[in-house]
Amino acid sequence: MEIWLRCVIWYFFLSGKNCWSVTYTHQSICTLKGSTVDISCSYTYPSYYEIKKAFWFTKWSGMDAEDLSSVPGYEGHIEYLGDKESDCTLRITDLRLSDSAGYMFRFITSGGTFSGSPVSLTVTDVVLEMNRRSVSEGERVTLTCRTKCTLDSITAYSWYKNGQPIPNSNTYSPVYSLFSVSSEDTGRYSCAVEGLEDLPSAEETLTVTCKYMGFKPLACYISIVVTDITVMPTHLSRVVPGGSGRMEVTIRVSSIRTQDHIIPSIKSNRLTLESTTVRPRMRWGQTGLEP
């Protein structure tokens, strides 16, 4: 806490009643964009003077301090919560990054003028940093929740995936790690500080790609694109699809020809059936394709 203090002592008054001062609870404040901040403040002056005007400013206009309440863009954005006795608290709502500045309180009395030292206000947004945005299954990803200044009284960080809280993810560290990721970890991630969960960071997208293991079950879910052979000229009217359930697919091929030969291949998440044979049978498993 820092105080600019000026005392004028007259021999026939108590010295405490003749002090000029402005006192701030905090000399520097860091807070989030979009939040509300109160700059707590108190002031004293000789009791035999009368307050004519009290206001906050950030800039000088020539030799005069520029009253924030008359500055374009501050109307409805700031509120003086103080009085003309001792309280000079200022409230700023819906904070913008451009509100970062040194704020000073000034009061004018019937016997003189006094200004306090600046309170440094830094407005920051929350930024999520992801060390890798595209990884293969089984690798590790580190998320870091950053601000450009140290916020007051942070006790925990909250983490979100696709806009929903990640269960049991609150940490007392700005770092959150995803160990041995799987395709289920693919999604949009964000973070927030405790008590200000309605002001999360912008989302960052994590993409987890599959590891292929030949024709063995795949390491993760895949997206299959196939060609409908029932409408191909070479198979038209000869191929009839069927199946006994949602997870089972069968086809019946009639009028067998020499070229009805199957060559399955998996390339870049694509299953290409170049031809077919009599009643090929496949079952979709939860982790891939089972022949």
Image (cartoon, grey):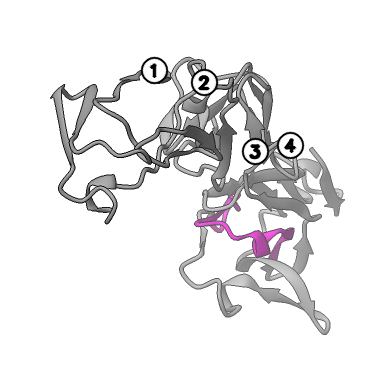
Work out which residue is located at the far bottom of the displayed protein and give it. 62
Note whether residue 173 is visible: yes
Magenta segment range? 83-107
Q: Is residue 222 left or right of residue 45?
A: left
Quick one: label 4, few (<14), some, or many (20+) residues within 10 Å?
A: few
Residue 150's disc is: 4
Query: Is residue 150 shown above or below 142?
Result: below
Disc 2 to disc 3, C-alpha distance: 24 Å
Residue located 69% across and 44% down the image: 30
Q: The disc labelled 3 sits on which kind of residue? A: Ser
- Secondary structure under tag 1 reads loop
Cβ–Cβ below 8 Å for labels 2 and 3? Answer: no
Q: Nearer the viewer, residue 217 or 177?
A: 217
| Residue 95 location (% of width, % of height) | 56, 57
Residue located 27% across and 56% down the image: 233
Quick one: label 3, few (<14), some, or many (20+) residues within 10 Å?
A: some
Disc 3 to disc 1, C-alpha distance: 30 Å
Which of discs 3 and 1 lies nearer the camera? The answer is 1
Which of discs 4 and 3 lies nearer the camera? The answer is 3
- Secondary structure under tag 2 reads loop
Residue 215's disc is: 2
